[in-house]
Amino acid sequence: MRTAAAVHVAAGTLLLTTLAAAPAGAGPADAEPRGTATAAARAAAEGIDFGACPAEQELPGTVQCGTVRVPLDYARPDGKQIELTVSRARATGKDPEGGKRKVPRQGSLVHNPGGPGATGMYFPMMGALPGWKRLAAAYDLVGYAPRGVGRSAPLSCTDPGTFFKGPSKAPVHPTAADKRERVARAKAYARGCAERNGGSLRYYNSLNNARDLDVLRAALGERRLTFLGSSYGTYLGALYATLFPSHVRRMVFDSAVNPDPERIWYRNNLDQSAAFEDRWADFKAWAARHDDVYGLGDTAREVQDGYDRARARLAEEPAGGKVGPEQLQAAFLQTGYYDDHWPHRARALSAYLKGDPAPLVEQAQEYPETAAEAENARAVYLAVECNDAPWPTDWAVWDRDNTRLARRAPFETWGNVWTNLPCAYWRAPRQRPLDVRAGSGALPPTLVLAAERDAATPYDGALELHRRLAGSALVTERDAGSHGLAGGANACVHGHLEAYLLDGRIPGRRASCAPHPEPEPASADRRTGEARPAA
């Protein structure tokens, strides 16, 4: 999900095909649960043979790697198998305060960073950071690449060599011709996914990701799972908690996706586009407060005008021959995810408007050497979201809903449409989204972390997940919007995370934390061009 203000979509207007709502797996209703139990038992017996990580992963020697086998189709657990790559850093057992006290090991902490399509293979490296020392002492930090990602039976939908096509345009209000071009592109992409992956494509979905997680739990030798899911990883965790409640030990939902089946995934993306507009406004207001550093204007309107001038100029003459309006948009979209990007983006925009394109080119250009990884991530993202649920199959529905939304949320609306539009023309069967919920006593206490102004996973999603999981605790960072709070800059939030994972303590039903400090403005060092704190 790339998408918080609610967007009304009238009932019955999605024109969803009944065929698209058929389950992806064939066979009796209990085939997949039985197949999961079979695969988990096999994985528990085999374990994971951890050893040195492949050189291309560029992981330190403290991290080991291995693989776990899972069925492509859980209804046929003895059929085709695929391998998921796994990484692990053993619990250090060391007193983080430097004393001689031995810290008891609490098992494995498994992380999914979201996407869908992101790899978690680098998660064990978090243990080297000061804020993670206490958790790394008690837990094996375990990451993995979900099915389709990286070396885990990778998906591809187009030639990576043609994936980056910059410089490219990104009109705020696309013409009818622009829309026809994008529809044709979406149809071609969906066709490429079907042709390159064949009948396997249907098995890349969130329910199978949750089943894979249970097989991984068994392979690690854990009777119950301790899990940290971020962004999309929260939806994966919510599915896991619904499917395997007795297998949950502790579970953290960091920046929660709205799990309401009616919002997976089309409506969630509408909500996301609306929320990005609010977060873009936060960035513009911040830049305006620091007009003395950036010279972008002392009002949000003036900052927007500067951005619009840059967009228009790039449409006429791409910066460095590489950065057009679409690359500009992709770079500045990061301001909606993480406020620590604000100083760098403001500096780049300021420099470009003053005649120096170098910082903007550095931050916004697409690098051919990363094209294969980016193409793989997008293929998995679309396979999972398109397979997970019905989507509107009539372009007129997308056009109507997003034209209406773009009038008040122009920053991200159409970019979000073009990312997700292949789902309108998808050629694999669709799942019916699971009704995520847990009644009183069904789960041990779980922890939800959320920022009130998160754009990528709007705050309403955290409220809905908290409502659906009885016994969960919700920790809110007020008046803040960075996406992904676990281990971040807010000591209050991190304290609740540690108390829960280390001691099982939750802060009642709800708790709140003051926002972390806004980033300090940074100007360019005249000698190096690097950002430095403003005087």
Image: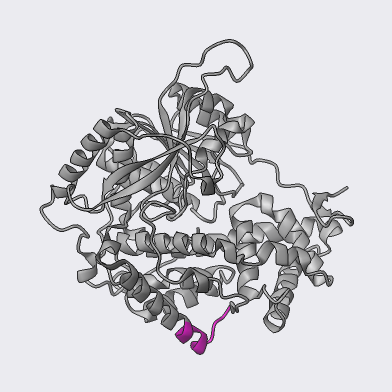
In percent of width and height, residue 4 lies at 50, 58
Q: How many marks?
A: 0
Residue pictured at 64% horizontal, 41% vertical: 515
Q: Is residue 425 magenta?
A: no
Colouring method of the image: one colour
Main SS class of the magenta portion in the image = helix
Residue furthest out toward the left: 28
Q: Is residue 177 magenta?
A: yes
Q: Is residue 106 left or right of residue 528?
A: left
Residue furthest out toward the top: 100
Q: Is residue 454 left or right of residue 293?
A: left
- Using the rendered view, name the quadrant where residue 326 is placed: bottom right
Is 84 placed above or below 168 here? above
Figure quadrant of the N terminus: bottom left
Name the foreground residue: 453 vs 196. 196
- Using the rendered view, name the quadrant where residue 134 is placed: top right
Name the foreground residue: 483 vs 530. 530
Residue pictured at 75% horizontal, 71% vertical: 306
Instruction: Say if residue 18 shows up in the picture.
Output: no
Is 224 placed above or below 359 here? above
Name the foreground residue: 131 vs 162. 162
In percent of width and height, residue 368 lies at 59, 66
Residue pictured at 80% horizontal, 71% vertical: 353
In percent of width and height, residue 520 lies at 77, 47
Residue furthest out toward the bottom: 177
Name the foreground residue: 353 vs 41. 41
In percent of width and height, residue 68 lies at 33, 41
Residue pictured at 65% horizontal, 61% vertical: 281
The boundaries of the magenta stretch are: 172-181
Q: Is residue 265 left or right of residue 113?
A: left
Instruction: Say if residue 251 shows up in the picture.
Output: yes
